[in-house]
Amino acid sequence: MAFNTIHSPHRALLDLHAALSSTTPLLLVTGANKGLSFVLHLCQQFSGDVLLTVRDEVQAVLPLPPAGHQRTAAAPYPLLSKEYGGLDVLVNNAGIAFKTEVTMKTNFFGTRAVCTELLPLMKAQEHLLSASLLEYFSGIIRDFVGRVVNVSSMVSLRALKNCSPELQQKFRSETITEEELVGLMNKFVEDTKKGVHRKEGWPDTAYGVTKIGVTVLSRIHARNLSEQRRGDKILLNACCSGWVRTDMAGPRATKSPDEGAETPVYLALLPSDAEGPHGEFVMEKKVEKW
C-alpha cells in the first residue's frame, strides 16, 4: 500500500507512485490533515494506494510502509484516470466553521466541486480485467470498490428542524435537483448578508446550513447514481463522525479521534456485496431518518 499526498484545498499537487497501473485500487481523501486518525485507519485497512489532499502542507508521522518514489503533477484529475483507471473510494472530509460565505464555499461548494470532477471517475464494480488478473486482484477489488463518503454533521439534522416548514419540505424532497439546492445555498448566503435569514426561515447556524447542503447533495448524487449507473453498484452516503476532539470541536468533545473514525471508515470500506446504505445520512454506523 502506497501513501501519497496532494497539497491544496481540493486539487493542487498529486504525488504518484512511479510504477502504478490502472488496476491499482485508489482511495482519495480531501481535508486529510484534519482527520489524521481515520486517515490512518483507512491506510491500514485499504489494500491499494491512498492519496490525501490537504489545505496546507503539513508534516505528519504515520506508521505506514514507505511510498517509494514520488512525483508531483499540477493537474491531478486527468492522471487519476490515466494512471489508475479511475477512483475506487472517495472521502470528502474537507470542512471548516467560519464566516458564512467562506464556510459555504468550503463545506458545500468545495464538496460539490470535488464530486463534479471525481464522481464520473468512480470505477464500476466490474473491472475489465483478464481472468488471470481478476483472480490475482480478487482480494483487493472485491473488498473495496465504488464507495463515496461525504462527511456531514449531526448539526445538519438540528439545523433542518430549525428551518421553516417550507424549507424543510424542500430539503427533504425526493425530487429536489442539484440546481435547486445550489440556489437555496446561495440564497442563504445572500439572506444572511442582508440580515433577513430568520425572516426567510433559516436557522442561526451557517455551519449547520452548509452541512444540510452536503447531506442533501449526497442524497441527490446517490439518486443520480441509482438512475444512471445502477449496475456499477457504487454506494454514496453522508455521515457524521460525532463530536470529536479536533481543532474545530475542542478538547471538551466526547469522542476520541479513533472513535470518530469508525463511521466514515465503515462506509468507505463497505464490502462489494453490500447493497446499502446508499443515499443515507449515517451516524454511529446506523442510518438516521432525514
Image (cartoon, rainbow, N blue to C red):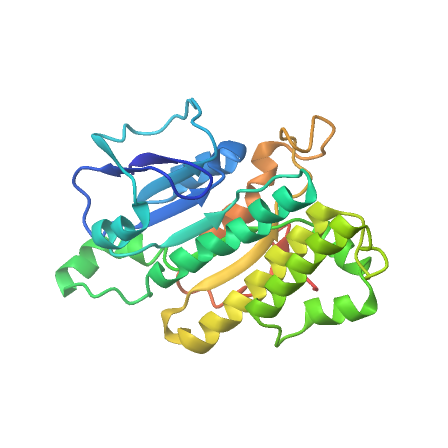
Q: Is residue 37 left or right of 245 when viewed as pictured?
A: left
> In the image, residue 96 lies at what x, y percent?
61, 39
- Judge by depth and name the residue closer to the eye, 247 or 106: 106
> In the image, residue 46 lies at what x, y percent?
37, 44
What's the residue at 47%, 39% (across, down)?
A: 9
Location of residue 181 by image quarter: bottom right
Q: Is residue 284 left or right of 13 when viewed as pictured?
A: right
Q: Is residue 248 above or below residue 271?
A: above
> In the image, residue 105 lies at what x, y percent?
58, 47
Location of residue 246 by image quarter: top right
Q: Quadrant of the C terminus?
A: bottom right
What's the residue at 80%, 60% (across, down)?
A: 163
- Judge by depth and name the residue closer to the eye, 28 or 145: 28
Q: Is residue 17 above or below residue 80?
A: above
- Judge by depth and name the residue closer to the eye, 5 or 38: 5
> In the image, residue 171 lies at what x, y percent?
69, 67
What's the residue at 62%, 73% (across, down)?
A: 176
Count of number-bearing discs:
0
What's the residue at 69%, 60% (across, down)?
A: 187
Asked if residue 57 can be seen in this view, the reply is yes
Q: Quadrant of the N terminus?
A: top left
Asked if residue 270 can be seen in this view, the reply is no
Q: Is residue 217 left or right of 173 when viewed as pictured?
A: left
Q: Is residue 217 left or right of 12 when viewed as pictured?
A: right
Quick one: which residue is furthest to the right in this view? 199
